[in-house]
Image: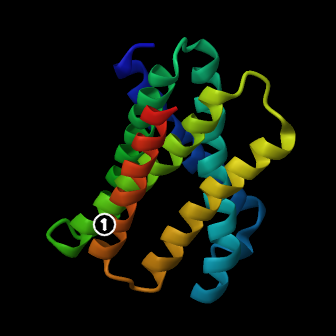
Amino acid sequence: MNRILIFSFGIAAAFSALVFQIMATIVFPALENSTSLEKIGAFMFVTIFIEEFVKFILLWKISQNSKTQKNIFWSSIILGSGFATAEIFLNFLNNNPSDTNLFFSYLGLFLLHILTSSVYSLYLSKKKNLAIWSTLAIFGFGYFLHFLFNFFVYSSINPLSLDCALIIFILLTCYLNKKA
């Protein structure tokens, strides 16, 4: 598949996830009007699920059309980059662009979406027929990584530390992809 098209799919996935998130807050207005502690729970669970589900479905579709594990892996990196770019753009519109701390937060956001996409691609490139339990497990793992990242961001953990951890995990997925 064309890399620009896959990047565009990532952007479209982010915007479609946003639409689903807005719909969720319309259907369940208490999600958005809750206290910050409650928001970390309910709202974060819903929004992360939506984002990861949209990415997983797109990567599954891309993996159906890709011939090699390498193509699936690099497509996941490009899709995750497109998704992250759109999310960063939307966050950038809502925040002060001169805040230098945001750079490392945005870098972490970018790395997180690449990480979860690459984890999904490692699974999808190995499986011809997806078993329900293993698919749920790998989706749960990506969901957990995203939730953990958001939890650390809300807990005011140093973004540079998070970025370093994400880089290590991305390098690990690259290694696992190359070794496979």
Residue located 60% across and 22% down the image: 63
- Amino acid at circle 1: Cys
Report which quarter residue 102 is drawn in.
Answer: bottom left
Q: Where 78 sits versus 47, above or below?
A: above
Is 41 left, or right, of 14 in this rendering? right
Q: Position of residue 159 (x, y in %)?
A: 31, 74
Q: Position of residue 88 (x, y in %)?
A: 34, 54
**Residue 75 in view in this figure:** yes
Q: Which residue is mark 1?
A: 164
Q: Where 55 sits versus 101, above or below?
A: above
Is 66 left, or right, of 89 in this rendering? right
Q: Please identify the residue farthest to the right as the structure is shown.
A: 132
Q: Position of residue 85 (x, y in %)?
A: 34, 45
Q: Position of residue 147 (x, y in %)?
A: 58, 67
Residue located 39% across and 85% down the image: 156
Q: Where 68 sits versus 134, above or below?
A: above
Report which quarter residue 65 is drawn in.
Answer: top right
